Image: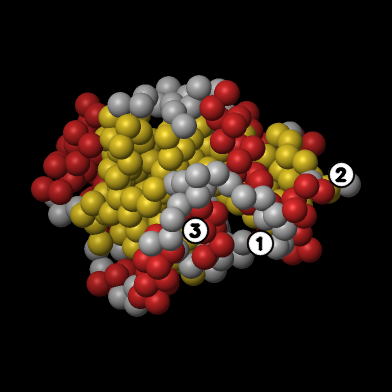
Amino acid sequence: MSDTIEVMGQKSLIQHGKHNNRIYLMKLDLQEAEQVIDQLSDLARQYGYTKIFCKVPKQVAPLFIADGYLMEGQIPHFYEGENDVCFMAKFLSSDRILHIEKDQLSELSSLLQENPGSKLNFDSRASEYEVRRLTEDDVDEIVGIYKEVFKTYPFPIHDPEYIRQTMTENVQYYGAVKDGVIGALASSEIDFKGKNAEMTDFATGGIHRGNGLSTMLLSAMEKEMKKQGIFTLYTIARLNSVPMNKTFIRAGYTYSGTLVKNTNIAGTIESMNVYFKHI
């Protein structure tokens, strides 16, 4: 089961469904902001969703606040290296904000007090792998790793056709390969017009874990994004995944908020952390 991605209004893009029990406004056309805010509320009432989550330019954030939204995160210079983006949320049920992961948030606070790394440090075992961009020939192997690592996921990464489709659009997949086998992979979801990219979908196969492959992939992907003219990198990482948070913090990414009970991943709806880095 996965949620539906569709156009709202004329040019805005949403994802919604019971899988995440939310609406996600992925892209907003500024000219239809007020119209979309009303439509989001109508859709949430129609299906009984418990959260509306929106990624919007800073200049329209006041419109969302006036409608009862809270700001959960913000990234400066997100669009074309200039305009900020705000992550706005409206909670429609108290159940959505109960049982917040207090212990994990406390651990995150401790992590954030560490000195961030000025560069990524590699595990010596990672030298046995090489990073390459993945192609359609790798789709079955990609899907196999995602099925092994993620019981559920907010997007249909278990579907080979979805992977193929995103490869032809704006997603680039990278793998850490040893002896012809993909040990770990991740992707860059790129907005070339906005000059930003989401570093996402990190997954490592069981026998390859503990070799620092996420760190290796992140470093290689950063270099590729810089070559392609990308200015801002960001990620939305699971609060419950200490290793992924450590990877981004130690790579010099800035924490900019927690999205409370936002995403169905690995079988439950979890809170997610936002990090960004300008390159």
Between 36 and 189, the one nearer to me in the picture: 189
Q: Which residue is mark 3?
A: 245
Q: Could you classify mark 1 by the number of other residues whose Cα lies within 10 Å: few (under 14), some (14-19), or many (20 or more)? A: some
Tell me what residue is drawn at x 75 percent, y 53 percent: 124
Q: Could you classify mark 3 by the number of other residues whose Cα lies within 10 Å: few (under 14), some (14-19), or many (20 or more)? A: many
Label 1, secondary structure: give it: helix
Q: Nearer the viewer, mark 3 or mark 1?
A: 3
Q: Quadrant of residue 92?
A: bottom left
Q: How is this picture coloured?
A: secondary structure
Q: Is residue 159 above or below residue 12?
A: below
Tell me what residue is drawn at x 60 percent, y 37 percent: 221
Q: CA distance from mark 2 to mark 3?
A: 29 Å
Q: Which mark is residue 149?
A: 1
Lower sequence index among marks 2 and 3: 2
Q: Which residue is mark 2?
A: 180
- Residue 263 spot, x, y in % from top left: 44, 59
The quarter in which the N terminus is drawn is: bottom right
Q: CA distance from mark 3 to mark 1?
A: 17 Å
Q: Amino acid at mark 3?
A: Asn
Q: Amino acid at mark 1?
A: Val
Label 2, secondary structure: give it: loop
- Residue 164 spot, x, y in % from top left: 67, 37
Q: Amino acid at mark 2?
A: Gly
Q: How many marks?
A: 3
